[in-house]
Every structure is written in structure tokens, then in C-alpha cells.
Image (cartoon, rainbow, N blue to C red):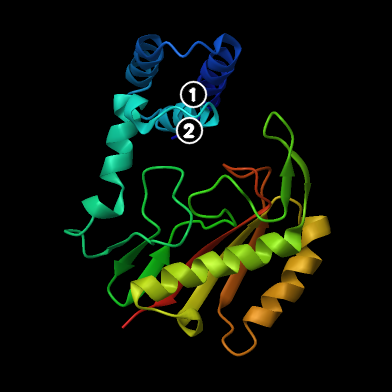
């Protein structure tokens, strides 16, 4: 289970890497291994944080840390064909951790939390970021449409569809300002099929987005 010391250590390592900017791969790798051993291997976000930093400086894929490469390979579409219950979309944004876009269980399809990011890009529809990656402004309407589009991609590739959604959990980072806009757009997408829905406010989400949806749908 996540706790403050783990999150703080991830933050400190990232800040140190940004400050040094020399990218001594051996040193970085050693620090990651040390942190993972200290926390029994659950510090899974650090390799992804390092990978993002590499891409900012246009490093080639061949320079990825072994842990990053291993994680990428494990959860790539090519590595999943033997797991018939796992769904890896070719159109939805790449997961930010070791999990698939969805999993089948009986006649139900369970989607992971899906946000508005675009596949193969750092772009987030309707979001303006500053040099430190913090949100300057955002358009919640644009994010809502993008989230629904990503969910449709996953449903269709899994053999389900929009009308088979039975339950929706919504995470908003600003309930007071964003809920009215979200609720209006939501109604446009669910005119006929009206699944159960739960909407909660959270302090923040793993990436600089303002909305994330978790969906359950029926599947034949």
C-alpha cells in the first residue's frame, strides 16, 4: 500500500535527477534498485518517472533503464496474446503503470481508470502546462469528450460497446466548478443507456488531468 515515505522518496529522486541533468545511468539504476529493495519492490512508479525524463531530453529507446524496458515489455500488446482476459487497446493512451486497459471476467468487462490523454503523445486535450509540468489552465469540456472517446476505443476493441456500460465511477479534481459541465456532457453521451454512476472528488490524479472514469460493461 502506498504511503508518504514512498511518495516522498520518489519525489526526492526525481528532483535530484532534474537538478543534476547529467543522467549517469548506472547511478540512477543503482538508486532505483536501492529504493525498491527498501520498500519491498513496490516502488513501481520510479522507473516510469525516469523514463518520462529521458524522453524530455530525446534519449534513444536503447538507453532505457533495464527496469523500464522490462516493465514496457511486460505490458506491451505483444506480450499479452496468451492472456485472453486482458485487453490492451491500440488506440487508447498507454497506461502509466503495470496494468492493462481492461480485463474480462465472465460476461463483464472491467476498465482501469481512463483519462483524456492521447496515445503516443504527451498532449492532454484542453490542458496547458507550465515548464514544471503543473497545470496552468484546463478545459474540462475538452477533457470530458476525450475521456469518453478513449473509453469507446477500449470497449470496441474488447468486443463490447457504449450501450453495454452498466456502471461508471467518476473522479473529478474540482467538483464545484467542473461537475455542472461534466454532468451536462455526460447526459449527451448517455441519452438512452443510463448506467449506475458514482462521482467523487479527489485531490489530484496521477497525471495532470482533471477527470478520470472507471467503467464496467457487459460483454458477450
| Residue in view at x 47 percent, y 60 percent | 92
Element carrying mark 1: helix
**Which one is in front, 92 or 1?**
92
Instruction: State whether residue 71 is above or below residue 112.
Output: above
Residue 151 in sight in this render:
yes
Q: CA distance from mark 1 to mark 2?
A: 7 Å
| Residue in view at x 51 percent, y 67 percent | 151
Picture quarter with the C terminus:
bottom left
The quarter of the picture where residue 140 lies is: bottom right
What residue would you read off at disc 2?
A: 2
Total count of labels? 2
Tell me whether the residue at label 1 lies in contact with that at label 2, contact meaning CB atoms closer than 8 angstroms. Answer: yes
Q: Is residue 74 left or right of residue 3?
A: left
Residue 108 position, x and y percent, is 35, 74
Residue 133 position, x and y percent, is 67, 34
| Residue in view at x 31 percent, y 33 percent | 69
Q: Is residue 165 left or right of residue 175?
A: left
Instruction: State whether residue 160 is above or below residue 61.
Output: below
Amino acid at each position: 500500500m502506498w504511503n508518504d515515505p514512498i511518495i516522498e522518496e520518489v519525489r526526492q529522486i526525481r528532483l535530484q535527477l532534474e537538478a543534476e541533468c547529467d543522467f549517469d545511468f548506472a547511478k540512477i539504476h543503482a538508486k532505483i534498485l536501492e529504493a525498491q529493495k527498501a520498500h519491498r519492490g513496490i516502488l513501481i512508479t520510479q522507473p516510469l518517472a525516469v523514463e518520462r525524463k529521458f524522453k524530455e531530453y530525446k534519449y534513444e529507446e536503447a538507453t532505457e533503464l533495464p527496469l523500464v524496458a522490462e516493465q514496457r515489455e511486460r505490458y506491451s500488446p505483444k506480450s499479452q496474446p496468451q492472456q485472453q482476459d486482458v485487453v490492451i487497446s491500440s488506440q487508447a493512451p498507454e497506461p502509466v503503470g503495470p496494468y492493462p486497459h481492461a480485463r474480462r471476467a465472465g460476461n463483464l468487462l472491467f476498465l482501469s481508470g481512463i483519462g483524456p490523454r492521447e496515445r503516443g503523445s504527451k498532449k492532454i486535450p484542453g490542458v496547458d502546462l507550465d515548464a514544471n509540468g503543473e497545470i496552468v489552465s484546463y478545459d474540462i469540456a475538452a477533457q470530458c469528450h476525450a475521456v469518453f472517446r478513449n473509453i469507446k476505443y477500449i470497449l470496441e476493441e474488447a468486443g463490447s460497446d457504449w450501450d453495454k456500460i452498466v456502471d461508471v465511477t467518476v473522479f473529478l479534481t474540482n467538483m464545484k466548478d467542473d461537475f455542472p459541465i461534466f454532468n451536462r456532457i455526460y447526459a449527451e453521451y448517455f441519452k438512452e443507456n443510463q448506467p449506475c454512476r458514482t462521482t467523487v472528488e479527489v485531490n489530484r490524479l496521477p497525471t495532470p488531468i482533471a477527470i478520470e472514469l472507471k467503467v464496467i460493461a457487459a460483454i458477450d
